[in-house]
Image (tube, coloured by chain):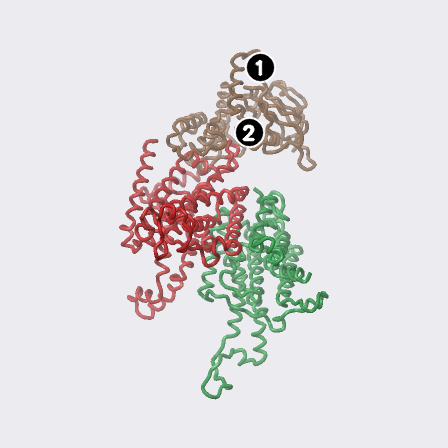
Amino acid sequence: MGAKTSRAAQGAKNTDGGIGRMDNIVLHVDDVFKSFGGLHALSDIDLQVAEGKTHAIIGPNGAGKSTLLNVCVGRLKPDSGAVVFNGSILSGRPPHEINQLGVARVFQTPEIFPDLSVLDNVVIPALAKRDGAFAIDAWKAMYSEGELKDKAATALEDVGLQEHMGQEGGSLSRGDKRRLELAMGLVQDPLLLLLDEPTAGMSRLDTNRTIELLQKFKARGMTKVIIEHDMHVVFSLADKVTVLAQGRIIAEGTPDEVRGNPAVQEAYLGGVHE
Amino acid sequence: MDRSSARNDLLLMVVFTAAVLTMPIWLTPIGAGYPDLLQKFAIFGIFAIGFNILFGLTGYLSFGHAVFLGVGSYTTVWAFKLLSMNILPAVVLSMLLAGVFALAIGYVSLRRTGIYFSILTLAFAQMAYNLAYSVLTPITNGETGLRVLRDDPRVLDHMFGIEVGESLPTPELFGLRTIGYEGFYICAVFLIIAFFVAMKITRSPFGLALRAIKSNQIRMNYTGFNTRPYTLAAFVISGMYAGLAGALMAVTDPLAGAERMQWTASGEVVLMTILGGAGTLIGPILGAGIIKYAENIFSAFNEQSLHHTFSFLPEPLQNAAVSISTMFVGEGWHLTLGIIFMLIVIFLPGGVMEGFRRITRWARKPPAPRRAQKIQTAG
Amino acid sequence: MDSIVLQFLNGLDKGGAYALIALGLTLVFGTLGVVNFAHGALFMLGAFCAVAMQQLLTLSVQVKDESVTFFDAFKEVPYLEIWLGDFGTSIIAWSVPISILLAIPAMLLIGWVMERGLIRFFYKRSHADQILVTFGLAIVLQEIIRIWFGANPIPVSAPPPVAGSADIGAWLGLGAGVVYPWWRLIYFVFSAIILAVVFGMLQFTTYGMVVRAGMRDRETVGLLGINIQKRFTAVFGLAAVVAGLAGVMYTPIVPPNYTIGMDFLVLSFVVVVVGGMGSLGGAVLAGFLLGILQSFASMNEIKSIFPGIDQIIIYLVAVVVLLVRPRGLLGRAGVMES
């Protein structure tokens, strides 16, 4: 409920001030620390993601990107600091509540429903979006849910899986599973989409298709946080780039600014040895 | 597509109803057309349908569902004793109380998944069984079992002026008796309703959510579903089904004993569901039917009837055949059951329904599956 | 005071049985990743090794009873007595310890056949499938025993020197009236020895090291190029022998019948869970703790406060442990905690 009203409010702001109110902060990572044992996985992370923007987080292996993402979706609790999304603190909330606030996540290793049909895989998140975290509508029949299925089918068309709709999710190839994941995130039309290396392991062709697809959704005003290795993807999509190394932010700016930053080059060159 | 799905469901419902109601006719040729056995088919069918909602749809393997069966039976007999010999209040109360028990046990057990869940349900079942035999004897009447007596209060019956005759009162439904074919038809109506509800649940968004939980519960949480209430709802629904089955057992034979709650009884419903095909609509009922039918056939054999069966063989062979097969019949029926069960789990985890599917696929287009497999491994 | 000591002792022998069964259960789970519902049946088979040995040793022939002079009376005399005289008689009397010699190879064989013939096909299948197939196997095994030995409990006697009771009252200065059956003391000592042997093997042999490493982290050990499953077939045999010996020695305490395995299985699972799935020390600790707890719960003083508590105490503890500390008493964090 809360998610819907705040979304409406956001939408209103968007229409009235496209130019003047550029930086409406949607996600605010505030001074987050997280350590495992003695290892500081994240120190002093401050991050602001503006509405409608694509914010990329890059960094060498072990820089803490996945930890940061996991803190954002409530899978890990930060030692100190907080993650605030549209005025609600995300830290410590169960995953389903965070999703219901309008944050969807696309996993790095495809997490799908292998026993369900590809279409049902996408119907499920659409259902969560429509009916909330829990609803016993045992008296409605799924086959009368035309609208829901149309929505799911559209999302599947967007990612190019329309021909596999009847197949079992588990029987898809790995690349197709990743696209299915993407459709599962997109169908919820989330306020914020978190993507964990959406093109890792994809062919050049598939990568370009994914970039195109994400650009299409960017045009619709969806805010995205994207963790990525592939610089080609980052520079094609991102409005703003944050560079992490050893759990700290070492640089932040537009793709071009970051590209020229000597500290970043240092970190990446150092990263080669790892 | 949508309309044809609705039509298929209607067709399934009509065929199922017709098949259940004509069971006394089409089961007679195989010797299963008599009321006692037919009642068992219906009652265990209900038990298995309900169990399937938890195990087949949601993926939680409970080893304690016999508790709800027992609760249903005890409640029914108590309703006969205190309220009325009419079965309606008894059945309603049984389902409600089984639901309450399921809510409590499920609330605790569902905090864990996998084998921990199985062991928690097993622990609760053992507790209930042990208590029924010891401290709860005033309620359960211990080893003797709870039965209806002539001078029980039966408040409602007294209010409506129904008096007890010389003999023990028997359960009834507005004058219908609950034994013989009348008893079967009462159970059959409950079975048809139970099947209808299960079908509705399976086809609903709620049912889809349950299947998704079975497939990947963690992903469900990240997709925005609070899975705990879903699993609890599935647990309570299946508990109420078990309560109904337990109630009908006491309706057709007004006696309730604690052995109904033993964990082997919980194991039996697992067997039925697997044998028929977990997760399918018809499978669990088929499984229940097959096991109860086979139990009936196998248990009835004794050495004499075996000699009769094998009388076409020469004497030494006949004796050998008899001595081997006695191990599997009569009291040895459980051995047969165990072997069948192992074979199913090993070779046909999808149960009889999976077998049907394989046969029809094979019959329709023999070369196709092999090619499809090749493509799959190539991709 | 007396009764407290007695209850404590009572708990020790039961706890020993729980610990031995749970040890094998958790060993198999930890190394092979298999949830074995047929483990109780192994205990039962061990018990029936003792029964079979007793029946074998007392195979008898009918001879004329000379003491009856009025008519021709016959009595059964075991062959052993005829062949060996008094020595034969004492062999028969010591049938339970002797049957250990039968049980070790028999249980090894049974364990090997079970693992090679069935369990290994289930390493990759879900825990639910493992539970189901071993549950089926347990039914089959116990039915075979029922066909062979009948449904009634078969009494097996302890050797005469230790068949009576020990005067522990005198040892502990509790007064003369306090006695305790010898065999139960022996059972406790026996289980302690077996546990020590198993732990010694795991601690001090190379193979034991691999097994412990495998329990800690199956994946890494697999990556080291050690074929876990092939290597650990022997673990299944070991678990079978331990469960079998627990069964052999238990026969003088409770006459075995074919369902004894199932009865112990459910309790042993609870013990494993309380101790921590995959934790060897946890299984032993929880086995003894629960055994002792159970025997204290059956004291009349306690039962009068909480009626029926003796019937449910173990399960109650299991429920509480699973909810409050799902990893169990000594389980490592993250092992099957969800």
Q: Quadrant of residue B238?
A: top left
* Location of residue C208 (image quadrant): bottom right
Q: Which residue is mark 1?
A: A22
Is C106 positioned to the left or the right of B334 in the image? Answer: right
* Vertical comparison of C171 with B7: above or below: below
In this view, the mark in front (2 or 1):
2
Indicate the amino acid at tag 1. Answer: Met
- Under mark 2, the amino acid is Ile
- Indicate the colour of chain C: green
Dot placed on the residue nearer the N-terminal end, 2 or 1 = 1
For mark 1, name the chain: A
Residue B209, percent from left and from top? 45, 35
Q: Colour of chain B?
A: red
Residue A269 in sight in this render: no
In x, y percent, where is residue A265? Answer: 65, 24
Q: Residues within 10 Å of mark 2 (few under 14, many from 20)?
A: many
Depth check, front residue: B249 or C337: B249
Q: Chain of mark 2?
A: A
Spatial CA distance of label 2 from label 1 is 25 Å
Could you tell me which residue is drawn at 53 percent across and 81 percent down?
A: C82
Secondary structure of residue under mark 1: loop
Circle on res. B79: none
On the image, numbered disc 2 is attached to which residue? A98
